[in-house]
Each structure stands twice: as structure tokens, then as C-alpha cells.
Image: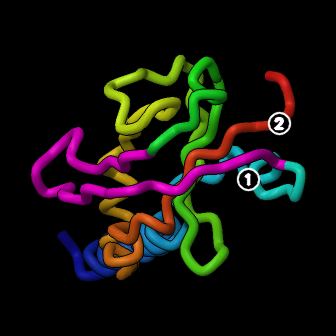
Amino acid sequence: MTWGRHKSLVSALMVAVLLVADAGGWLLNRPPNTDCLPEVSAPEGGTGTRAIKTVVQPWRGMHHVYGLFIIPDRFAATKRYAVTISVDGVLYYCMWVEKSLKRRMSPEHGEYLVQEYVPTRVALWFLINGLLGDLRRSENWAIVFSDRDS
């Protein structure tokens, strides 16, 4: 292999590495999911309830990142709601859930305990961006019930 050919290969490899690094930086810096941002963040967006407890242990695998919520009885029949994670008023994660709320147990009359999972990749994004402590704070988690019919 001649030096000119080797130099071209090294140059092409450097360009490819820079492009991959740039794409990786973009992916790491963008929020994990905000697909319901406009509807949930609007003033008339809906009624919400905060988490009473969070479990954030993504290193243990799937189903180890979740929040526990006490849902008033009037929302028990809801079939569409959003799970959000906001830090200092900035919405970092929002996911529409389209399923019936599961009634696990009744801590008090007229209220139900609901456990909502967040994908492990979302917790890893919070970890990489130095926000894992914020993810653990239950006041940053909410379930938002839309006032609009879906």
C-alpha cells in the first residue's frame, strides 16, 4: 500500500469518526421523549397528580424505573393520560399511555395506587446528562389527565 493511499484512508476514517461523534453528541443532548409537549404544557392541558414515590435503579434492568401515584377515583376509568418528568419547569419526558388505569390497592377510600414505568433508556439519558438525582425526586414526576376527550 502506498503512502498516498494510506493517507486517504486515514483521512476518510477521521471524517467518519467525527461524523459519528457529532451524531452521538446530538443524540445524548436531546431530551428522550417529548411527543406530547404541546397538549400537556398548555394551561388548559389537564389535571395532574404527582408521584408519591419513585424507584430509579436502571442498572438492575427493565422495570426498575417507575413512579407510584395515588389517583383519585374520578380518574380511575381514564383510558388515556400522560406520564411526564419535568425538572425546574422544563419538560424532559412525556409519554402518552393509552390503557385503563390498573387498580392495585386502595390506600384510602376513593383513591387508587398506580405504578407507571419509564423505559430504562430514559433513565440512562438522565444519568448521562447528570440529572439522575432530579429523576429520583418524586415531585418531578406527574400523571396528567387531559381535559380534552381523546
Residue at image point 46% right, 31% down: 109
The residue indicated by pointer 1 is 37
Q: Please name the predominant secondary structure of the magenta segment in the image.
A: strand
Query: Is 20 left, or right, of 50 in this rendering?
Result: left
Q: Is residue 6 above or below residue 123?
A: below
Residue at image point 58% right, 51% down: 49
Closer to us: 13 or 32:
32
Residue at image point 36% right, 44% down: 119
Q: What secondary structure is marked by label 1?
A: helix
The residue indicated by pointer 2 is 147
Q: Amino acid at mark 1?
A: Leu
Image coords of residue 75 (percent x, y): 63, 29
Q: Nearer the viewer, mark 1 or mark 2?
A: 2
Q: Is residue 3 above or below residue 45?
A: below
Q: Amino acid at mark 2?
A: Asp
In the image, farthest residue toward the left? 60
Image coords of residue 2 (percent x, y): 22, 75
Quadrant housing the N terminus: bottom left
The residue segment tinted magenta is: 45-69
Category of crowding for the residue at label 2, using alpha-carbon neighbours closer than 10 angstroms: few (below 14), some (14–19), many (at least 20): few
Magenta-drawn stretch contains 134: no
Closer to us: 124 or 27:
124
Q: What secondary structure is marked by label 2?
A: loop
Residue at image point 84% right, 24% down: 149
Query: Is 125 left, or right, of 91 in this rendering?
Result: left
